[in-house]
Amino acid sequence: QLQGALFDLDGVITDTARLHAKAWQAVATQVGADWTPALADSLKGIDRMSSLELILRAAGKQDAYSATEKQALATAKNERYLALVDTLTPADILPGIEAFVGELKNHGFRIALASASKNAPKVLARLGLAADFPHIVDPATLQHGKPDPEIFERAAASIQLPATACFGVEDAAAGVTAIRRSGALAVGIGDPAVLRDADLVFANTGDLTLSALQQRLAG
Ligand code: B16
Ligand code: MG
């Protein structure tokens, strides 16, 4: 019996993946990495410094920058990202998400946020969703990022449930793998060919309803 819902933020609740990409693209250009869709995809769900490492590797410059220089690149990216976050409004909530969260609450589900983003509380506030997500895992306290299951284990614990009593919703391959490994049911949003570890995949957030979920589980 499912009693808990563990949400990813970027790409599930709102399309900040687009804003992260915009901010990272400037870094990629600066360090001489080719900005490809594959590189952009590989950054989803990955923490800030690991994302920078992937961009430097794509440029063949993994050893070209000192720790201080890397810190400066990451800070510049975050400042660019935060300026974009400031433009978000409740209209930027992805289709169906508010209705789905309402439905979950009506059915007594407990809800937690499992986002790798240190900016998640800010983003939720801009979207007007802060009150719906009182339980947010602080990614700064984690030993391992997605695809490690730690963040989803902690999210389940924050609502006093075993992960096996929860489902997680993710748009990124690394995140889906993390949910799967935590023991929660992995619901992917996007392309099943990319989200291979998911138990169920919905093409869009708009398809995500409690009855659709239950139907797919029964079928
Ligand atoms: P920040 P999620 C992740 O959030 C993003 O998908 C990823 O692209 C980003 O680098 C990461 O958060 C860290 O974000 O720089 O704001 O701390 O998908 O796990 O909600
Ligand atoms: Mg995501």
Image (spheres, helix red, strand yellow):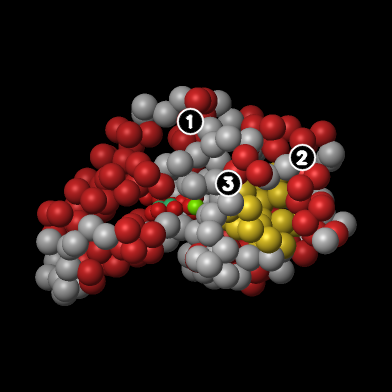
Q: Position of residue 11 (x, y in %)?
A: 49, 47
Foreground pick, 216 / 148: 216
- Under 8 Å from ligand 1: the CB of mark 1? no
| Residue 153 appears in the figure | no
Label 3 SS:
loop
Q: Residues within 10 Å of mark 2 (few under 14, many from 20)?
A: some
State the separation of the CA atoms marked 2 and 1.
Answer: 20 Å
**Which of label 3 and label 1 is nearer to you?**
3
Nearer the observer, disc 2 or disc 3? 3
Report x, y in % for residue 176.
Answer: 58, 63
Give the image location of residue 170, x and y in percent: 57, 55
| Distance CA(mark 3)–CA(mark 1) | 15 Å
| Mark 1 nearby-residue class (10 Å; few <14, some 14–19, many ≥20) | some
Q: Amino acid at mark 3?
A: Asn
- Which residue bears the numbered disc 3? 204
Which mark is drawn over residue 104?
2
Q: Earlier along the polypeptide chain: callout 2 or callout 3?
A: 2
Q: Secondary structure at mark 1?
A: helix
